[in-house]
Image (cartoon, helix red, strand yellow):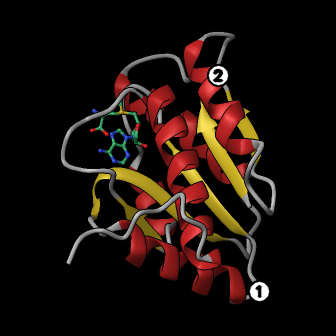
């Protein structure tokens, strides 16, 4: 699995949490960082989209993280992730920059997934996605990390 994201995550609390969840993930999550675009928002997003798409294999199943995407619970996400992984295509997640995605990313995406209607800082979205990937793995394995207490 691969995460392609805008910006460079520096040392600090987000890095520590991301490393903690990533160290528990199997298969490993390869993280590719692309440079933040420059210029007016439309141009910046176009440049970021070019870099993001260049890092994404043509045959990848691309999941774009976007607040306008599909809202699912962790069990549904876990089962969807399993299906994507079993499809034989490499699974790539993508996180945009401060201005969000260019339309080209949403058009290319095979799935658009939301962490809720609130807008989160993109470095926190990395941590939240890694935690959900770990939770999805725990659900698949029946590991008690995920407490299925809801009716
Ligand atoms: C600061 S947000 C960009 C906000 C931008 N104004 C927009 O409309 O997309 C940076 C990136 O974090 C991710 N992100 C932020 N909030 C999210 C959410 N609720 N669900 C999924 N991804 C989110 C998206 O990939 C977004 O491109």
Q: Residue at x 78, y 61 (%)?
A: 26
Give whichever of discs 2 and 1 has the lower sequence position: 2
Residue holding disc 1: 88
Dot 2 lies on which element?
helix
Observer-nearest of 137 and 116: 137
Q: Are marks 2 and 1 in contact (CB under 8 Å)?
A: no
Q: Residue at x 45, y 37 (%)?
A: 125
Answer above or below: position of 111 versus 117.
Answer: below
Residue holding disc 2: 15
x%, y% of residue 146?
A: 47, 62
Answer above or below: position of 127 versus 14.
Answer: below
Q: Residue at x 78, y 42 (%)?
A: 23
Residue 72 quadrant: bottom left
Q: Within 10 angstroms of label 1, few (less than 14), some, or many (20 or more) residues?
A: few
Observer-nearest of 12 and 95: 12
Left or right of 60 on screen, residue 45: left
Tag count in the figure?
Answer: 2
Nearest to viewer (mark 2 / mark 1): 2
Dot 1 lies on which element?
loop
Q: Looking at the image, can residue 30 be seen?
A: yes
Left or right of 33 on screen, residue 38: left
């Amino acid at each position: 699995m691969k995460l392609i994201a805008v910006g460079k995550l520096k040392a600090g609390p987000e890095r520590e949490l991301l490393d903690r969840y990533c160290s528990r993930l199997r298969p490993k999550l390869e993280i590719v960082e692309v440079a933040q675009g420059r210029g007016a928002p439309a141009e910046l997003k176009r440049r970021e989209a070019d870099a993001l798409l260049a890092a994404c294999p043509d045959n990848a199943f691309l999941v774009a993280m976007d607040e306008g995407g599909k809202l699912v619970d962790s069990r549904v996400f876990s089962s969807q992730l399993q299906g994507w992984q079993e499809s034989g295509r490499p699974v790539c997640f993508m996180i945009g920059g401060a201005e969000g995605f260019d339309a080209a990313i949403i058009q290319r995406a095979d799935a658009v997934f939301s962490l809720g209607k609130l807008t989160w800082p993109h470095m926190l979205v990395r941590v939240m996605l890694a935690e959900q990937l770990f939770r999805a793995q725990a659900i698949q394995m029946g590991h008690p990390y995920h407490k299925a207490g809801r009716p």
